[in-house]
Image (tube, grey):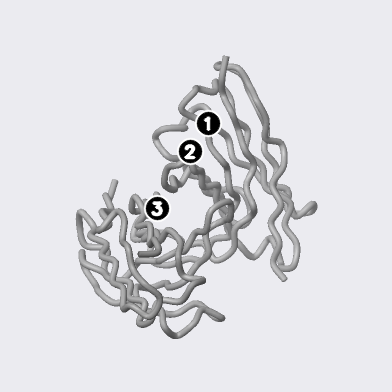
Amino acid sequence: EVQLVESGGGLVRPGGSLRLSCAASGFTFDNYGMSWVRQAPGKGLEWVSTINWNGRSTGYADSVKGRFTISRENAKNSLYLQLNSLRVEDTALYYCAREVRGSSGYYYDSWGQGALVTVSS
Amino acid sequence: DIQMTQSPSTLSASVGDRVTITCRASQSIRTWLAWYQQKPGKAPKLLIYKASTLESGVPARFSGSGSGTDFTLTVSSLQPDDFATYYCQQYNTYSATFGQGTKVEIK
């Protein structure tokens, strides 16, 4: 059974930093690209970042480019998201999701339960 | 970025009803469209990909159709477990975008 378990969320002040982790199990992690998708309280879904299977190709939404960094450690079956220069509008539940490729993009066939990031003074 | 617009935003329906949700893309995405179901406090669940292919384990009362810019998700006979919020997502480009969601409520 595919399992994705996020951790590392918390309360942080504007301008602060946080590192999210996602532990994967139940599948061959380095066969898949992975993404982070977030959901602000009471709002819809927003794609944040993607990383390919070997970590050499990454992509970011304009709203986080230059502030967030995605990475992975295949030997540990782990995905990470480093969040820097956090803003109030970054407050959200952050999901890690397994990608399935189609055309130039991806859909997501497995999701974690999410890690809550709250940015507030 | 490709914009995705769902309608309606909220839908009130009864058990047994046939329900249709529409998703429109701001430009052609061919059939690179997925649908998800999300229940309160839970992660999204994949229902359909490539516009009309049912994900394994998803009940056959769910179906998807469309291509280009206009898509629909249909539930042929709404069940109590189907009251949830539904999202469409385009993956024609690497920067995926989602619709704003359609909440299906009990009438």
Earlier-in-chain disc, 1 versus 2 = 2
In the displayed image of the protein, which residue is found farthest to the right? A76
Mark 3 vs mark 2, foreground winner is 2
Q: Which residue is mark 2?
A: A40
Residue linked to disc 3: B96
Q: Residues within 10 Å of mark 1 (few under 14, many from 20)?
A: many
Residue visible at 52% across and 48% down in the picture: A50
Q: Pointers 1 and 3 in contact (CB under 8 A)? A: no
Disc 3 versus disc 2: distance between alpha carbons?
Answer: 17 Å
Q: Find residue B71 and report its horizontal and vertical position in percent.
A: 26, 69
Q: Is residue A36 left or right of residue A63?
A: right
Q: Is residue B33 or residue A43 the one in the foreground? A: A43
Residue for point 49% across, 28% down: A66
Label 3 chain ID: B
Residue A89, placed above or below residue B61: above
Q: For the residue labelled by badge 1, is the local secondary structure a helix, a strand or a loop?
A: loop
Residue B96 pos. (x, y %): 40, 52
Q: Are marks 1 and 2 in contact (CB under 8 Å)?
A: yes
Observer-nearest residue: B18 or A4?
Answer: B18
- Circle 3: residue type: Ala
Q: Which quadrant of the figure contains the C terminus of chain B?
A: bottom left
The secondary structure type at the circle numbered 2 is loop
